[in-house]
Amino acid sequence: MTARTSRELQLGVFASGRGSNFSALLKAIAEDRLNAQVRLLVSNRSDAGALGTALEQGIPTKILSSADFSSGDRFVKTLLFELRKHGVDFIALAGYLKKVPMEVIREYRHRIVNIHPALLPSFGGKGLYGHVVHEAVLNHGCKITGVTVHIVDEQYDHGPIVAQRSVPVKEDDTADSLAERVLQMEHRLYAETLQLFAEGKVRVEGGRTVIDR
Ligand code: GRF
């Protein structure tokens, strides 16, 4: 285990839905493949699957939706307050469908990552999530697709890319079958990439990442 040379990430995970990536991260932590501890699960939806998983495992949760606040400013202040209160020092978006507020990006500069089910910069941006991504890949006749983990900046699916893996597209793929294979790859790549951060191997230089191997 690489934990001896790494620093335990104090993770905040943001998830809006099913939460399979969140579960995969928890599994990687339990199996000592990822030196991290999830300090807080944040969701904008009370019916997110990830919330149930967090509750089962005794992980603190917070449901925070900007729609429930009288102003964006109050929402951001509450979000930052909760992250600090729980000692979060690194944020992993795992199917979080909201934009991360600028103030949070500023406070956690280069310490927020997102996972996207395609090879960015293709098939990313506002509205390109879930099956829409895989359908677009199939409609273009792409022969490969994949997974991207990137640092989050002020634009959707835009910041410096940290890791990518390709997934072949098969002739008879449907959006469902493709999504399933891509998801298996996501589950492996996200934990591996976060471990690189735990090991202090990721630097951002000139808007790009450099990985020390
Ligand atoms: C994943 O495909 C991820 O790449 C994207 O949203 C999906 C979330 O799935 N950002 P899950 O909630 O982790 O199962």
Image (spheres, rainbow, N blue to C red):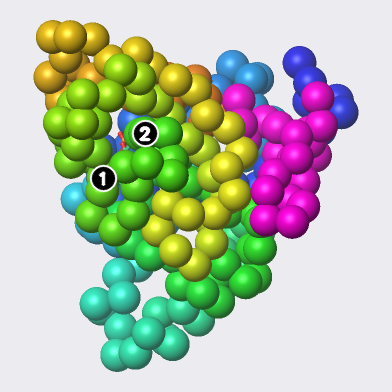
Residue 137 located within the stretch drawn in magenta: no
Check disc 1 and give the amino acid type.
Answer: Tyr
Residue 129 circle label: 1
Horizontally, is 105 left or right of 171 in the view? right
Location of the C terminus (image quadrant): top right
The magenta segment is 192-213
- According to the picture, the residue beneath numbered tag 2 turns out to be 118
Q: Position of residue 1 (x, y in %)?
A: 76, 16
Check disc 2 and give the amino acid type.
Answer: Ala
The residue located at (43%, 44%) in the rendering is: 121
Q: Nearer the viewer, residue 60 or 194?
A: 194
* Label 1 near ligand 1 (CB < 8 Å): yes
**Residue at mark 2 to residue at mark 1: CA–CA distance:** 9 Å
Residue 196 located within the stretch drawn in magenta: yes
The quadrant where residue 5 appears: top right
Q: Nearer the viewer, residue 124 or 71?
A: 124
